Amino acid sequence: LDLIAENFAFAPDVYGRESFCRERLMLAVPADRAVNETAAPFRLSAEDVRSERHLSDETPAVPLNLFRKEPFLLLKEGNDTRVRAEKFCAQAHFRPQTRLLLDQQITAYNLACYGMGAAFLSDTLVRHVPPVANVWFYKLDGELSQREICFYYKRSRYLTNVMREF
């Protein structure tokens, strides 16, 4: 591999990095779940996320403990999104009821759309998939909800002009 786009921080003595963008984690909840009525003041549609309404200080973050009884679709251990999800839940004083452990956010998103459970997702994913009406999104609060995506390359390898330009 020449370049890696990743939210995980690689060892700086081995890998150089260039910042690409910041993304925000959100909670996606199937629209048919009753909890969405309780959380109605915090609900966001896919269009709201695409228009970056969730980034506004005027848009309140949802109290995550509203979802303590919901089934969750979590990524497997070691994944940054999983680590953050567990920290979010711990801060809200509950352990998530895990329905499935998955490899990728896109799978969690699709299963949330099919009503299987709530999933922690990045706004980057939500902005780049076709919008659907059967899932609501919720803004999460704090530094934990934000992360940087970087391009990484091995310092010991030649960085071509094409790679630099990219």
Image (spheres, helix red, strand yellow):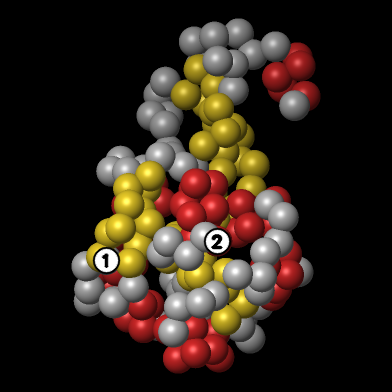
Left or right, 134 with respect to 14, comes to: right
Q: Which mark is residue 96?
A: 1
- From this view, report whether residue 41 is shown above or below residue 105: below
Local packing at callout 1 (Cα closer than 10 Å; few below 14, some 14-19, many 20+) is many
> Residue 75: horizontal and vertical position, in percent?
37, 48
Left or right, 111 with respect to 63, comes to: right
User: Where on the picture, by quarter, is residue 132?
Assistant: bottom right
Label 1: state its secondary structure.
Answer: loop
Label 2: state its secondary structure.
Answer: helix
> Residue 104: horizontal and vertical position, in percent?
46, 42
* Residue at 57% over, 33% down: 5
Residue 145: tell me if it is visible.
no
> Residue 93: horizontal and vertical position, in percent?
22, 76
Front residue of 163 and 89: 89
Residue 111: tell me if it is visible.
yes
Q: Which mark is residue 120?
A: none
Question: Which comes sooner in the sequence, label 1 or label 2?
Answer: 1
- From this view, report whether residue 30 is shown above or below residue 101: below
Name which residue type carries label 2: Cys
User: Where on the picture, by quarter, is residue 117?
Assistant: bottom left
Front residue of 17 and 72: 72
* Residue at 62% over, 77% down: 44
* Residue at 70% over, 61% down: 131
Local packing at callout 2 (Cα closer than 10 Å; few below 14, some 14-19, many 20+) is many
> Residue 64: horizontal and vertical position, in percent?
38, 77
Quadrant of the snapshot with the C terminus:
top right
> Which residue is under mark 2?
113
Name which residue type carries label 1: Pro
